[in-house]
Image (cartoon, rainbow, N blue to C red):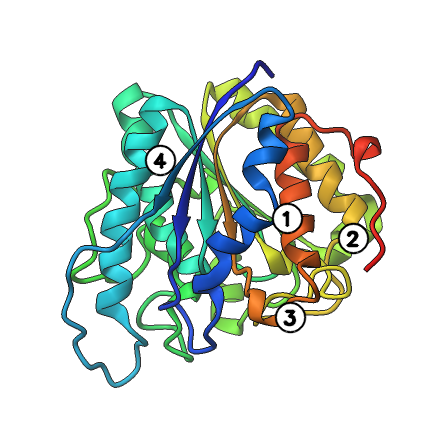
Amino acid sequence: MSNRHCILQGAPLDSGKRRRGCLMGPDAYRTAGLAEALENLGHRVTDRGNVTPRPFSEQPHDRLHRQSETIAWTDALAESTEMALRDGMPITMGGDHALAAGTVLGAMRHAAAQDRPLFVLWLDAHSDFHTLESTGSGNLHGTPVGYFTGRGTFGGWPALPAPVPFENIAMIGLRSVDPEERTALQETAITRVDMREIDETGIARPLSAFLDRVAAAGGMLHVSLDVDFLDPAVAPAVGTTVPGGATVREGHLVMEMLHDSALMTSLDLVELNPFLDERGRTARLMVDLAASSLGRSVFDRPTRAY
């Protein structure tokens, strides 16, 4: 992959769930040296600061948590991501996973303008495939895939150019999926790779097959990396810890394969809650993974004692 123009945008979005702290994520990534890590790889880096949502008035809802605010963030992030894609590769520093409703929407708009298909790689313990009707918790960080695939009714949310086709999505690292989501997913062509499959056959085979499909279609690839894709033993700074996640080595392998493919056009780094971290270890690991996706070899990383 040739040197890129990496455009950093902070998304201090904390409306997608009730446990607070993800709004500190963008500053944690900056403090952990994300820009410097990418510059050291020869990339040009522009930090456009934090995105701010348009003014909103929160409408009380008997179930859904802070929906008006999340819609405002979706509008703002779709606009900023679409603009960033015209100039380079946006890297959105989150913020909880509700932000992906906006970043994927922005990528969809840009892909449509380029007359190219959009593919989404979802690296997460959860499928986030709920609709507004099916979510039991009311936490909207569990709905972005449902939104951008056109499931259910998202009244008042920005209109989609067209839903992302199920066959253009791969979810890797799944290990906590609600029964309603599981039933719905089984009726789709979404590629689903849970941790048992990774244990049995490895993570490279299904990822390679998905990347081959992206390349064959001439597609753009949006990657959404949730901290809880990783095992909490190595990445504790997340409010939705699920034991049994990807190892550090598996995480780097995924990101190195993305670099080798030269297909990634936008990247989310989500659900980092610095309030729950241990001396910045999760933020540093996420920075290291982002660097691997843009050309750093794992063998170049210094060993750190925590």
Local secondary structure at mark 4: helix
Which amino acid type corresponds to the residue marked 1 in the rendered image? Met
- Residue at the bottom extreme, as displayed: 62
For disc 3, the neighbor class at 10 Å (few under 14, some 14 to 19, many from 20) is some
Q: Nearer the viewer, mark 4 or mark 1?
A: 1
Local secondary structure at mark 3: loop
Give the image location of residue 48, x and y in percent: 36, 38
Left or right: residue 20 compared with residue 58: right
Residue at 85 percent across and 55 percent down: it is 305
Give the image location of residue 180, x and y in percent: 47, 71
**Label 2, on which residue?**
247
- Residue at the top extreme, as displayed: 2
**Label 3, on which residue?**
241
Which amino acid type corresponds to the residue marked 4 in the rendered image? Ala
Give the spatial CA distance, label 1 vs label 2: 13 Å
For disc 1, the neighbor class at 10 Å (few under 14, some 14 to 19, many from 20) is many
Give the image location of residue 244, x and y in percent: 76, 64
Q: Nearer the viewer, mark 1 or mark 2?
A: 1
**Label 1, on which residue?**
286
Give the spatial CA distance, label 4 vs label 1: 22 Å
194 over 240 or under it: above or below: above
- Disc 1 to disc 2: CB gap under 8 Å: no
Inspect this view and state whether residue 210 appears. Answer: no
Give the spatial CA distance, label 3 vs label 2: 14 Å
The image quadrant where one finds the C terminus is: bottom right
Q: Quadrant of residue 47?
A: top left
The image quadrant where one finds the N terminus is: top right
Which amino acid type corresponds to the residue marked 3 in the rendered image? Thr
**Label 4, on which residue?**
107
Local secondary structure at mark 2: loop
| Mark identifier at residue 250 | none
